Amino acid sequence: MKFLLYLRTILVVLFTCTQLHVFAFTANTKPNIIIILADDMGYSDIGCYGGEIHTPNLDWLAKQGIRLSSFYNDSRCCPSRASLLTGLYQHTAGIGNMTTDQHTPGYRGFLQPNAVTIAQVLKQAGYQTGMVGKWHVSETEAFPDKETQLKWLNHEITDRDFSDTLSYPTHKGFQKYYGNIWGVVDYFDPFALVNGTKPVPAVPKDFYYTNVIGDSTAAYINQFSAKKDPFFIYMAFTAPHWPLQALEQDIKKYENTYKKGWKYIREQRYQRMVKLGLLDPKTVKLSDFMYPDKQWETNVDSAWDARAMAVHAAMIDRLDQNVGKVIAQLKKNGQLDNTLIMFMSDNGASPENPSVFGPGFDRPSATRDGQTIAYPVNKEVLPGPQTTYAGIGPQWANVSCTPFRYWKSKEHEGGISTPFIAFWPRAIKNKNSINHTPAHLIDLMSTCIEVAGASYPTTFEGNDISPTPGKSLFPVFTGKINGQLHDELFWEHNGAAALRQGNWKIVRVDAKSGWELYDLSQDRSETSNLAAKYPEKVADMQKKWAQLALQYHALPKPIVKHNN
């Protein structure tokens, strides 16, 4: 008997050591890590999440990896980027609203000294680090007068930094950076484009930003692969954020796709999502179209609206083509099998209409060569070229976020739910699987730390670092968790707010609205408000939300809106 017990102990130890050996990487076998972020892309836009948009490269990553059905962001561009980069809720990192300093701790408008980035942490663990694309976590201070601001936006003023260069990526852990510091960009000639910290003085005539992001990322991969050290790359697209600007050959693919209208596309997406197994129709119903009085058949702007969504699709199609460049470069350099790729979007689709905003703050009035930019308030000019600034609008945003309600800037599921794909052949063996564990952008820091064998610091460059509430997604990727990872998840943006505890969620549209209550295990689409039925539950969760708001510095503040 003693011999059998001894033998069993030896076998357990050997098995454990074997398991540890698989993922206890040496300096030469640590995985490369690439985070790919889309901008204003809805939950159901890409093919592997039910969309009709042609995304073969993202679909391939999903088939070779894993998809999460309940992954969350912060519902807005720069807050989501702050959480992604730091592993903190956006208010703790200092960007609770946008990138304007509102002089309260949670709303400084730029990353605070209590936060470190994934790049800073992984760099200390021996990683090469690079970023390409949209930064949008530096303070964006405009000229006090609109006339001078427009000259800057129109490339007439070229001798000014776009923000404090000490807040740029190259001072936040990234050894290499090429991209835009501000948020909104002209895709054919971006404002706030820098290489390192130096403004890019001009771009070639065939420049299209999504292509350049792909080409630059591929170049970084090639450069980093020449060294033995692993690399971390953050690839932050601006697509498909407005303005709706795409290459005509991509738009042409979708010129007839959206002519049947909003409700038809929503229903088709929902049916594909059911077929894919992303959702159970018993618990995730297709929510009602949020504009029941609008009928496509009587829509006098149907041609313009179909074109707008075709451009949106073309922008995502081109994004996917450039993800293909990354995959191809990794294959060419022999790096693909040991690279963890994670893909997601920063928020739901945008309902905004930049045509109504007009030029100003981050929206130019003319191109570099003097062409006037149209803001077609009455949809009198078609979207697509460089000389038009327009968005898809709320109806298509509702479609883009199928099957949910609401969109960007709201904390309902349509605003905070994103596709999430993880690909890593060496570690993810349950290929083409779907995991329903709720997770959040705050989890990316802990995930990168675990797979890289790094450590989250308590101090950095003389500053105390706030602890991350994030959890590693590695056990989710490997199938060890398919249920609960967090006790609770927290949201606040411009007064819209939410708290999820288990399957219960309270949410409000804005600070003046009452709390709604949903059981997401039965009603992920948030169609049946249970607040009146369970007032005690609402009160308890509201109290907890208030405690967390205080803890995370999500305090009341004057709201400064820049419509980006």
Image (cartoon, grey):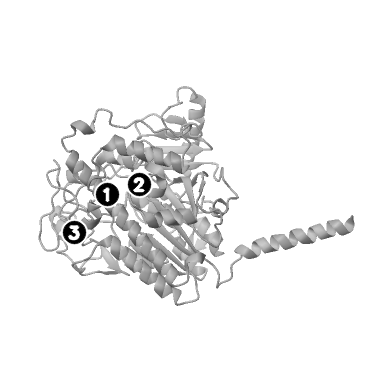
Quarter of image, res 398 = top left
* Residue that appears at 58% across and 48% down: 481
Q: Is residue 182 above or below residue 197?
A: above
Residue kind at label 3, given as amino acid type:
Leu
* Residue that appears at 28% across and 45% down: 560
Q: Rounded to the nearest whole Å, what is the CA distance between mark 3 and mark 1?
A: 23 Å
Circles 2 and 1, Cβ within 8 Å, touching? The answer is yes
Q: Nearer the viewer, residue 77 or 474?
A: 474
Q: Is residue 5 above or below residue 197?
A: above
Q: Would you name the residue on which mark 1 appears?
A: 312
x then y, percent, for residue 18: 68, 63
x then y, percent, for residue 352: 25, 43
- How many numbered callouts? 3
Element under disc 2: loop
Element under disc 1: helix
Q: Would you name the residue on which mark 3 appears?
A: 153
Q: Nearer the viewer, residue 468 or 190?
A: 190
Counting residues from the start of the chain, the first of labels 2 and 1 encountered is 2
Answer whether residue 49 is visible to the viewer in this image. yes
Which of discs 3 and 1 lies nearer the camera? The answer is 1
Q: Would you name the residue on which mark 2 appears?
A: 45
- How many C-alpha atoms fall within 10 Å of the one at disc 3: few (<14), some, or many (≥20)? many
Q: Rounded to the nearest whole Å, what is the CA distance between mark 3 and mark 2?
A: 31 Å
Answer whether residue 129 is visible to the viewer in this image. no
Counting residues from the start of the chain, the first of labels 3 and 1 encountered is 3
Counting residues from the start of the chain, the first of labels 3 and 2 encountered is 2
x then y, percent, for residue 469: 52, 50
Residue extending farthest to the top is 533
* Residue that appears at 27% across and 62% down: 209
